[in-house]
Amino acid sequence: MRRPMLPQRKPLYLVAVNIRSLYNVGALFRNGDAFGVTRLYLCGYTGTPPRHEIAKTALGAERTVPWEHHRRTLPLLRKLRAEGIRIVALERTRGSTPLPDYRPKFPVALVVGNEVTGVSPAVQRFADDVVGIPMFGQKESLNVAVAAGVALYAFNLRRRKK
């Protein structure tokens, strides 16, 4: 049986920087598949397939989502910006735009950072926009893969609209 052709969508990239947990990397692949990510960039010391831990949570998405590894993040982001891709960091800061209020301009690359330290200040300064997920509980953040899924879902709501 042939898979139905998916409609062309505006490009949406995911950039994962210094993700320690291979299980989180696998979950990012799953998010990439679920939300139609054009390409997943694994940067810094973020693990890459093939790894059992990635495959365990990716459930095959590591074989279907296009990906690349880049040791250094800023040169990649410069290249993406030169290609006309808007750079958006996902990080809660005083100046970040709340995710529900953000209107992404495609093509866009969403940057997520380390589970403990988040997106580096250098990447935040380089980004065209910084968005944050409003938190209503006691904790100040979400797991990186969960946060990426929330943001990708919100971006996709805007991506489908003409």
Image: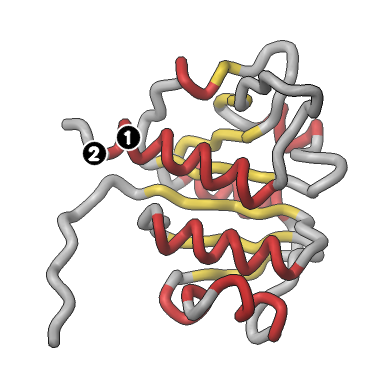
Say above or below: 72 vs 153. below
Q: Badge 1: few (under 14), some or many (20 or more) residues near its Cα, within 10 Å? A: few
Q: Badge 2: few (under 14), some or many (20 or more) residues near its Cα, within 10 Å? A: few
Q: Quadrant of residue 51?
A: bottom right
Q: What percent of the width, then of the height, locates residue 37?
A: 41, 56
> Tag on residue 95?
none
Q: Extreme right residue here?
A: 116
Q: What percent of the width, then of the height, locates residue 91?
A: 69, 30
User: Could you tell whether 79 is left or right of 124 in the image?
Assistant: left
Q: Which residue is mark 1?
A: 157
Label 2 close to label 1 by CB (< 8 Å): yes
Say above or below: 63 vs 25. below
- Which secondary structure, mark 2? loop
Display coloring: secondary structure
Picture quarter with the N terminus: bottom left
Residue at left 61%, top 80%?
A: 55
User: Could you tell whether 22 is left or right of 41 in the image?
Assistant: right
Which of the pair 17/59 is nearer the observer? 59
Q: What percent of the width, then of the height, locates residue 54?
A: 66, 75
Q: What percent of the width, then of the height, locates residue 63?
A: 47, 81
Residue at left 21%, top 32%?
A: 161
Q: Which residue is mark 2?
A: 160
Q: Distance of mark 2 from mark 1, alpha carbons?
A: 6 Å
Which of the pair 154/78 is nearer the observer? 154
Residue at left 58%, top 59%?
A: 28
Q: Amino acid at mark 1?
A: Leu
Say above or below: 22 vs 160. below
How many numbered marks, from 0 up? 2
